[in-house]
Each structure stands twice: as C-alpha cells, then as structure tokens.
Image (cartoon, coloured by chain):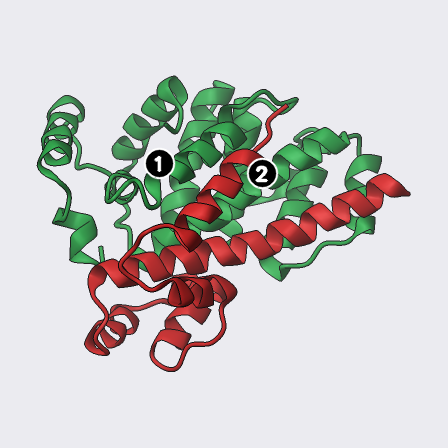
Chain colours: A green, B red
Amino acid sequence: MRLKILDSGHGFGTKVLFALIRAASRQRVLDVIKLVKYRPDFYGTPMSEVTQEAMRGASPWSVGDRELMAAFIAKINRCEFCTKAHSAVADLAYGNRTKAPAALSDLESSGIDEPLRATLVMLGKLTKEHVLDADDVRAVIAAGASFQQIEDALAVSFSFNIIGRLADSFGFSVPPPRAFDAGAKYLLARGYR
Amino acid sequence: MSNIEQARRALLRRVLEGEGNASLPDRRAAFDNSGFAEPLSQLVAKVAGNAPGITDEDIDRVRQSGLSEDQIFEIVVCAAIGQASRQYDIAKAALEAARRN
C-alpha cells in the first residue's frame, strides 16, 4: 500500500481484529479490508452502507449477476484486485466457475442471458467513456431488462467505480487465488457491512 | 428494489461536509477534479481518469509538497467518489430520459 497509515495506522482494537482474521483464514488481511477499517467514520462505514444496498439489497438481479457486474466494471477499469475478487464471489454465487470467467473473457460469445449481456455493455460504455444517453438505455430495455434492473445496475456501477479507483490509487497488493476464495466466502455469507 | 440514494447522500455529506484533515475546499476540489496546482492536480486527475497509471512517485510528490498521509487519503477518496458521482448522474439522467419517452 502506498500510504503507511492504511497498512499500519489502525487503532488497537482493529489490529486485534486483523490478528484474528489472519489466524482464522491463514491469509494476510486483504488491503480492501485495511482500507475500510481505517478511520471508518470517514469512508469505510458510509461506503459499506452504499455497497451493501447495491450488492445485497432486494433486486431483480441475482447476487451472482451483481458480482459479475462488479468484476466487469473492474476489468474495464483495469483493476486487477477487484476483477479477481468479484469474479471469485460471482463464481461462488453462481455455483460454477465458468459463467463469470466466460463473460469477462468474451462477453459476446459467453452465452449469458441477453438482458444481462446488454446491461454489461451499457456499464462498460459508462465506465470506459463516462457517457450514456437515452438510446443506450433503450437498447438495454429492448434486450429485455427492466428500468428497475438498469437502476440497480447503476448502483453497482457507482460503488465499483469508487472501489476500483481506490484499489489502484492506494496500490492494493494482489494476493494468491486462495485468498480471494476465502474473501469470496466471507462476502457471500456476510455481505459488505 | 435496491435504493442507494439515502446511503449515497450520507456518504457525500460525510466526505464533503464532515470533519477531516484536508480542508473542505480541498476535498470539494478533489471531488470536482478541478482547482488544484501540481502535484496534486495530476494525482487527482489520475484517480479520476487513469487510476491504474498512478505510481509511487505520484503519491511521493504530493507527500513532499507538505500534505500528510491522512490528507492524501481523504483527497484520493473524494476524487474517486467525485468521478463515480459524475458517471452516476449522467447515467441516471439517461435513464430518466428513456423513461419519459
């Protein structure tokens, strides 16, 4: 991490928590956890409320779909940490290890449902080009998504266009796959709070 | 259906209006990606437009300009939230325009 405070500036209670996490998971504490636990009143706590609602609030999208959206946005933003982290959660939520990787590798040939494919295309344009117009939205509606699904997808986009930028700005280290698997189990069971 | 509006507004109020180590004008400037001189202007622009391109040197230059790590933390957070907010507002406007027609 590029800021020492994010690595080691936490209070005593949080350092004890990190020691427990290391003991229970036998993995290093992920940098994203160090970020949200540093002065959590400023960023971590209010941001977690947003992300919990976007990713686990009631929605026509499944948890797996929303985790795939998060991974897809991260890939467009070239954030390796977030792409791997949320691809692992999508795998777990979907119950297979092929659907999310296929969509991330080649969306058009992945065979995912048309409403989700069109929604990912829209999120990709918004994330890469920072623009979107009514015709882009109508294309997603024509593909079978509802207005509510689009609104919920934009909530995912808001969260992960923040988190990915912070991961890259602060220089999150990218751990081995087993660490992401452990993190995915936690996020699926406990959510983002 | 999921609704992030209340939580999103609370997040914006906290980082832009609440207590912090960076001044309120600096946090707002970071959010808006405007109004800074070098080296902070380059760091904030990269957070908004090219976060994977940020280097240790970008952070070091800002640190050497006199900002504390807590100030850098807050400014980077505000810059990231600002860019995501601009995208979100554009997308919500497109959604509402499509709903009307």
The N terminus of chain B: image quadrant: top right
The disc placed on residue A13 is: none
From what the image shows, is residue A150 above or below residue B17?
Answer: above
Disc 2 to disc 1, C-alpha distance: 17 Å
Residue under the image location 70 percent in, 36 percent down: A150
- In x, y percent, where is residue B50? 46, 65
Residue A125 or A2: which is nearer the viewer? A2
- Looking at the image, residue A52 sits to the left or right of residue B56; the answer is right
Q: Quadrant of residue B87?
A: bottom right
Residue under the image location 26 percent in, 33 percent down: A179
Q: Report in which chain the residue with disc 1 lies.
A: A
Q: Report in which chain the residue with disc 2 lies.
A: A
- Name the residue tied to disc 2: A155
The C terminus of chain B: image quadrant: top right
Question: Which mark's residue is nearer the viewer, 2 or 1?
Answer: 1
Disc 1 residue type (three-letter): Thr
Residue B67 or A98: which is nearer the viewer? B67
Q: Quadrant of residue A22?
A: top left
Q: Callout 1: helix, strand or loop? A: helix
- Name the residue tied to disc 1: A45
Residue under the image location 60 percent in, 30 percent down: B3
- In x, y percent, where is residue A24? 15, 22
Q: Are marks 2 and 1 on the same chain?
A: yes
- In x, y percent, where is residue A181? 32, 28
- Looking at the image, residue A144 sits to the left or right of residue A149; the answer is right
Q: Callout 2: helix, strand or loop? A: helix
Inspect this view and state whether residue B83 appears: yes
